[in-house]
Amino acid sequence: MDINSILIAAAVVGVVGILAGILLGVASEAFKVKVDETEIKVREALPGNNCGACGFPGCDGLAAAIAKGEAKPSSCPVGGEPVAKVIAEIVGGDADVEKMVANVRCKGDCNKAKEAYEYVGPKDCRIAANSPGGGPKGCSYGCLGFGSCVKVCPFDAIHIEDGIAVVDKDKCKACEACVAVCPRHIIEIVPYEAGAIVECNSRDGGKEVKQVCQVGCIGCGMCQRNCPADAIHVEGKLAKVDYAKCIGCGTCKEKCPVKIIS
Amino acid sequence: MKLTFKGGIHPYEGKELTMDKDVIEYLPKGDVVYPLSQHIGKPAKAIVKKGDHVLAGDLIAEADGFVSANIHASVSGIVKVIEPRLTSSGSKVESIVIENDGLYESKEFVPNDKKISEFSKEEIIGAIKDAGIVGMGGAGFPTHVKLSPKEPDKIDRIIVNASECEPYLTSDYRRIMDEADKVIDGLKIVLSLFPGSKGIIGIEDNKPKAIALLKEKLADDPDITVNKLKTKYPEGAERQLIYANTGRYINSKMLPADAGCIVHNVDTVYAISEAVREGKPLMDRLVTVTGDAIENPVNIKVKLGTSYKELVEAAEGFKEDPAKIIAGGPMMGKAIYTLDLPATKSSSAILCMTKDEVTEYESSACIRCGRCVSVCPGRVMPNMLSDLAEAGAIDEFVANNGMECCECGCCSYVCPAKRHLTQTIAGTRKLVLANKKK
């Protein structure tokens, strides 16, 4: 083969390469995307789980919103106070966060709550909730214990123990993934240092509750009558705490005859 | 070629247990319970109160709205209480409990001797509505609503679903063998509502005697044909039945009326005849009490509201301890955990089995054999849908036509890996429907 053809080919490729390089160089300057420096800094401060608990499309979405001033520095429930402080330094503003955690309002485990029947089928609460009676558990309000919440938790903070879901309060970041998936809607977000939590979700009357569970709210109203701060009320046969009013005195825990307030 | 649809299965029929036995009539001894929601739509509104005395045939709860149905007492007695009671669906439903006085006194019904052509449409639909008739095949859709489609002129086929494709069930067959005239009369009454429409009785070819009987009775009738269908499950599912009989295809977003069809169960047309001709409300139905755990499997003419426990006793009780009891047929019925349930307008059977075959198997991973796809009458891919359902991918589930599933159970029946396909898909369909309502 002629040496010339090799040289020509090399030259053509070389020239094309140089031209393309110049073109790309010019284009990168001409079409430069303007990036908000603050946004990048905020993004770096965020944990990067992309869990969506803040309500924005992932950490990038939240970073953009914080940089524009559309969200508070404390908007990331996962990062909590440390992250809020860092972000507050970047964009200014308030870094106060009240730590919240998820809580499963059921303590009716295998020993304390009755099963109505033996369930055969997919081990998934959302599917089991469609079987007769809304699932095998005798109580139609309690935790089914098939762990749909465990599967969706991005922080390994909820586990099935003795047939009911239990939240690891220190790992929980209150991202609400479990709240959304639970077909029985028994998971709620409560303050980490809540003074009193009603650990039951049954809106049945006392007699029906007693038939199926040893640790169910019977709606007797003892807590409501004895609360000094008017912070606990029985609504539809179930006690409910107003965390804003609760002073954490512990009277309701003492007075509750079935000991379901913790 | 036999009339049928694509897909389907052929499970053990189990019909020989009760098929040729005479129907027995059973009068309840204990309390009689009437759930206010025995139909699709709004629950009925109780119009009696505790302590009231009622006669059989008295209206005790009236339809609350258009898509709702009246409920009548089936025995005489005193209203004991109105409270939530467990029904065969597994949930508690507000129910009227009547303390049966054991006299079975009945209200007088006014028969109507007019010819069919002399009845006005309003009279017929009014009589059906007053009688509280709902679809008795299982879904319980109020019949007067079904008979009042948006465009009545488009209806040209009235199909009576006599295929009874669920294994073990023979109540529709017995109804035809014993009361063929009334069944045909009921169909004729419905046909009179839609001038120019043709009647079709669709019946599976495993019931040759019933086919012969109907053909003989309808030999001179040009308006009604008896269609022999291939014995295959789910031949009696509404969409499949319409396809097999007329070649018209409907999907989950359409009603049979969109294909010019109205489909009724055998027992429903029988009840229509009784309501229009004799002024009788819907107070009883046929229930097949069967299965290998039952001493004397038989069809029972049951007063609505009778407890399942009494019905099992009427069939001479259990021969062996049952391992599984199902309200309805084995394919689409629901397993129940107590017999303390009332028979309702849509209770077709109580099936008691000595062996619970479902719990004996562990489900394992899908081996991609495709059997579920080949039997699916809804023409979807159950293997893929159940994967999407398990992953909680609701949008993809809908995009892959998950809503076309009719929950017939064919996929679970054929699955060699014993996967809970129907259960998973059905659960997700309910989730989708619930989300839509929000």
Image: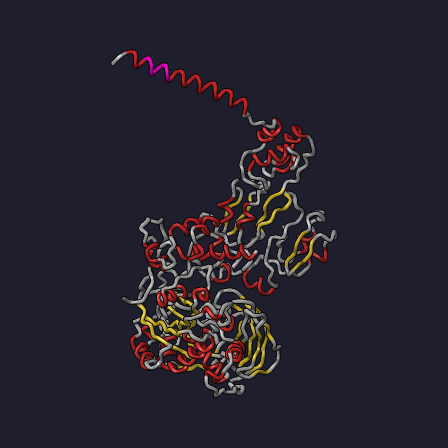
- Res. A17 image quadrant: top left
Q: Which residues are magenta?
A: A7-12
**At which x and y percent is residue B231?**
31, 68
**At which x and y percent is residue B126?**
54, 78
Q: Is residue B148 above or below residue B253?
A: below
Q: Would you say the magenta stretch is mainly helix, strand or loop?
A: helix
Residue at horizontal 56 percent and vertical 40 percent from the top:
A52
Residue B174 in view of the camera: no
Residue B179 in view of the camera: yes
Residue B237 lies left or right of residue B147; in this view the side is left
- Res. B354 image quadrant: bottom left
**At which x and y percent is residue B414?**
33, 57
Q: Quadrant of the N terminus of chain A?
A: top left
Residue B42 lies left or right of residue B379; in this view the side is right
Which of these two is toward me, B260 or A60? B260
**At which x and y percent is residue B184?**
39, 79
Q: Is residue B86 above or below residue A177?
A: below
